[in-house]
Image (tube, grey):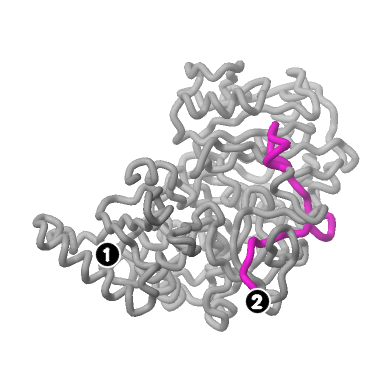
Amino acid sequence: MQSTSLKSYLLEHLDVDHQAVAISDGSTTLTWFELDQQLRTRIVWLQENGCEPGERIGLLMQNCCDYVPWILAAVSVGLWIVPINWHLTAVEQRYIAEDSGMGRLLCDPQYLNLELGCPRVDASSIVEASGGVAVAATSAAGGIMLYTSGTTGKPKGVQRRSPETMGELKSQWLNFGTAIGLDGGVHLVTGPLYHAAPLLFALYDLLSGASLVIMPRFDAGQALALIDRFQVTHSHWVPTMFVRAMRLPEEVRSNFSGKSLTLVLHGAAPIAPAIKHALIDWWGPVLVEYWGGSESGAISRCSSAEWLARPGTVGKVLPQYEVCATQAGHSLPEGEVGLLGIRPLNNAPAFSYWQDAVKTRKAYIEGAMFQLGDIGYVKEGYVYLKDRESHTVISGGVNIYPAEIEAVLLQQELVADLAVFGVPDEEWGERLIAVIELVAEAHEALTTTEGRDALAAGLLSRAALSLASYKLPRELHFGTIERSAAGKVSLKKLREQYA
């Protein structure tokens, strides 16, 4: 193996062949040497164009090789870089640009004409720069300010308080990667890099020497082909991606080897137990579930073996955190259900919501302990989730957790996807509604009223074998479930639609 002479601080520790592939997106490939050169060029450009430490700069680009060098360059010169979701409307993108106060926006050429309230720069036009100041371990570190998905309201910018120096930031990222199991190899990026998990897990693995294979857009069949072609070892998926892979033609599934896989991370949304069992049978015990959020990163980790041994768990708490259930801001005994509190340990970063001191204060209890809005309990160091606080339905004075109902209904073979939620009700306070997306072969039953009624009755009667009567949806609708690229459903839109 030929050692590189990598000069960029975030890469210089790597002992890799400088002609080996570092990043590939299907149309462009960067070797480690080329990645290093791009990173240095972008650092110099940011410095020469007056970007000062602590400022915010936007990034509106689709998945490509160029995404990662811009992220690394921005944090290297002390900037807060704000990735923007390219799927959003111009109005939603302008909100983030204005709310964050970004000084300029780096973007793909097709976004240059958008009126977003700040100067726009064609990111692909930056090919060379001169001068600049070297980045060292003692240089001021920047960070990545991610906006929450906004499934229940306006998105908020999340600033995870970055270490003061680049040396501390690099150490922190390497430690997070090690804790979750990312230790180099080949990493397949399946999701949009504007989301926390696909971006951060890719960065952690890259700093451990992993080469990145970036999918411009997810396609289940292509993902399987890429895994075998590039001998992918690590990847991150969301449950909807697994479902699409399971529905591929038998010929495609049987031709997939997957022998190179050692770690497939998944999180962001609940997964049906039947789907996960089927994936473990197909791919082997490589699935690793995590729990966390944009505010914290991964908090717990659950291997396939741990999940099979402890049904329902989302994993053991990572060394960087301490977790307990709370009620009214006070810790509960082990095993009791409450709002989960997280305390950072070992210099794990705390966070704040950008320009929202009130929301930040509400998130913190007992000093440094914060809450992400998840309800659950902890037993023997393992976290078990019940639901999100914002999803909890209170009907007739009783708390109902939609995630529990979704898990039961998803086990029925006719259910492809669904969302369970509450809407205002004069008598009950809230009434429970389920919107179900059926598998293709069940659609014929929806052509008649009798068929729809029989289908609904059958689904509810089978669910009643596992759920108390008060947990059964009072209304059941059939439709298509729209999910974001992170696998999340906009409950705000559904509540407005079905209220």
Q: Are marks 1 and 2 in contact (CB under 8 Å)?
A: no
Graded by Cα atoms within 10 Å as few (under 14), some (14 to 19) or many (20 or more), the crowding at tag 1 reads few
At x 77%, y 59%, the residue is: 343
Q: Position of residue 274 (x, y in %)?
A: 39, 74
Q: Earlier in the sequence, mark 1 or mark 2?
A: 1
Q: Position of residue 409 (x, y in %)?
A: 35, 68
At x 46%, y 43%, the residue is: 216
Residue 249 image label = 1
Q: Position of residue 77 (x, y in %)?
A: 78, 32
**Of 294 and 446, which appears nearest the observer?**
446
At x 38%, y 71%, the residue is: 408
The magenta-colored residue range is: 336-360
- In the visual, does 152 lie left or right of 478? right
For the image shown, how many numbered marks are present on the structure?
A: 2
433, above or below 58, in the image: below
Graded by Cα atoms within 10 Å as few (under 14), some (14 to 19) or many (20 or more), the crowding at tag 2 reads some
**Of 141 and 408, which appears nearest the observer?**
408
